Amino acid sequence: MTTRSRRRFFVSARRAVGEPHLPLALAVVVVLVLEGLRGRATFATSAAWPIAQAIVAGVALALAWVSRDRLRLGPVLLLSLLFDVAWIVLHLRLGVAGDHDPIDVYPAQGNELLHGHYPHSEYPPGAVGLFALETWLGGGTARTANAFIMVPFQLVCVAGIWALRTRWSAWLATFVALWPLNAFYWEFRFDLVPTAALVAGVLLARNERWLEAGLALGLGAVVKWTPALTVLALTLWLLRSTRVRAAGWHIVGFAIPVLLANLPLLIWQKSELTAAYTTQTARTVTAESFVYLPLHFLWNAEPGYWYFGAADVPPEANRAAVWFQALAVLVAVAVAALARTRSSATAAAALTPAVFFLTNRIFSPQFFVLVLAAVAVAAALLVEHRGELLCIVAACAVSTTANTVLFQSLLGAEPVATVPSWMAISTAAFVPVVLATIWLFVRTLSRAPESPLAERRTAVAM
C-alpha cells in the first residue's frame, strides 16, 4: 500500500468513526434481530429482551451524540422508516397478534360505521373514522392496516422535532425516531396520530402560525381529545400577552376540525357523541397508574387480580386521585399561561397533555408514545446544558423500558400483583419521567424573557 493509499484509508476510517448514522443503522439491525429471537410470544417473556434492546439503542445514540452535529434529517427519516416497516413486517411474519384492540375493537367499530351505524364507542369521532378506514383497507380487519398507517405519523413526529432547529433538536428527533421501547404500542394503537398533531401544532405555534397550529391540534383532538389542553394553554398565554387577535385565530383553527367531526354526530346520535367523553369516568384507580403508588401507602390501596384492573381503593382515595389530576393539569396550564417567552409557553403547552396522562388514575402503556414526544419537544426548547439534557433523556429511557417490562414481561403472571418486583418496576416506569417533566416546568418558569425583536427573528428563521 502506497503512502497516498494509506492516507486515504485513514481519512476514510476517521470519517466512518465520526459518521453518526452508522452506529444507528447497526443498532436498528441488532434490535430487530433481538425482536426476532424473542419470537411470537411478546407477553410473559423475559425482561432481558427489552432491556437488551434498550442497551443496544442507548449505546448507538450515545455514539451518535459524539458527532451529533453531523446528523442529517434525510438519513434519520430513512432509518426510522426502515425500522418501523421492518418491525411491522417481522411481527407479521412471526404471527404476533399483539394487543386485542386492533384485532377486536377497531374492526368491530369500523365495520359498524361502514354499514351506516355509529358504534357505541369510548373514542372520539375521528378515531372511529380511522377504524373504519383501517377496516376498509384491511378487508374487514384492522391489525395490519393500523400498523402501517401509523408509520407516516411517526415520521411527522421526527421531522417536527427536528424542525424546531434548536441546539439539541436533531439528536432528540433521532432519539424519538429509533428508540425501540415505544414501538410495540404505536404499532397496535393509534396514539401516534394525536402525538403527531401535537408536535406539528407546537411547531406551528412557535413559528407564530396560530391558525395552522389550532388546525393541527384540532385534527389531533378529534382522534384523542388531549391536544385540546395544549390549545387551552396557548390561548391563555396569548390572551395574557394581550394578543387577542392571535388567540382568536388559534381558536378558529382548532374549532374547524372539531366542529366538522362532532356536529354531524351531534345531529345524528347525540348520546354516542357524549359516550366518547364519559365512558371512562365510571372507572376507578388502577394499580397500573402513577397515583396508585402513593395511595398504596397512604390509603392502603391494593391491586385487583390484574394490576391494570380496578384497584381496591376507598371512595375518598379515588376522589383524591381525581382532584390530584385536575390540580396537576391546572398548574401545567397556568405555567404555560405565565411563561415569559414563546418558546417556554409552547414547551409547557406541549407538556400539558403529558401531565394529564401521567396523573390519570386509569393509565395505559401506550400513553408513553405521546409523553416521550412531548418531553423531547420541551427539552429541545428549554434545556441549555448538555448534562441536563442527557439526564432527561436517560429518565425517559428508564421509564419507557420499565413500562415495557411491566406490560410485556409481567402480563402473563396470574395474578401479576403477586410478583414481588412489580411495584418497583412500576415506580421505575413513572418516577424518572415525572421528575423530568417537573424539571422542565421549572425550566419554563426560570427562562429569561427575550426581546420582541429576538422572538420575531426566531420565528422568521424557522
Image (tube, rainbow, N blue to C red):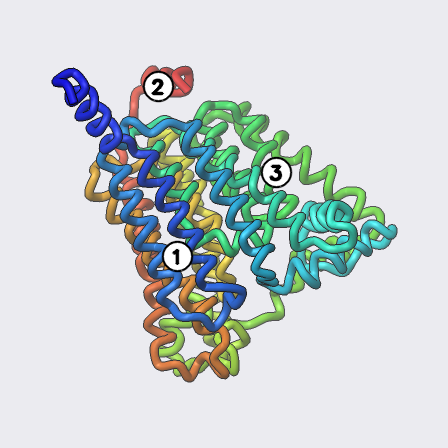
Q: Is the residue under label 1 in contact with that under label 2 (CB below 8 Å)? A: no
Q: In this view, does 289 lie to the left or right of 125?
A: left
Tell me which label, 3 or 2, sits earlier in the chain.
3
Disc 2 marks which amino acid?
A: Pro
Mark closer to the observer (2, 1):
1
Query: Distance from label 2 to label 1 (Cα)?
Result: 38 Å
Marks counted in the figure total: 3
x and y percentages locating residue 203 in the rendered image: 46, 30
State the SS at label 1. helix
Tell me which label, 3 or 1, sits earlier in the chain.
3
Q: Which residue position is annotated with label 2?
A: 452
Mark closer to the observer (3, 2):
3
Q: Which residue position is annotated with label 3?
A: 218
Query: Distance from label 3 to label 2 (Cα)?
Result: 28 Å
Disc 3 marks which amino acid?
A: Gly
Disc 1 marks which amino acid?
A: Thr
Closest to the observer, 167 or 13: 13
Q: Quadrant of the C terminus?
A: top left
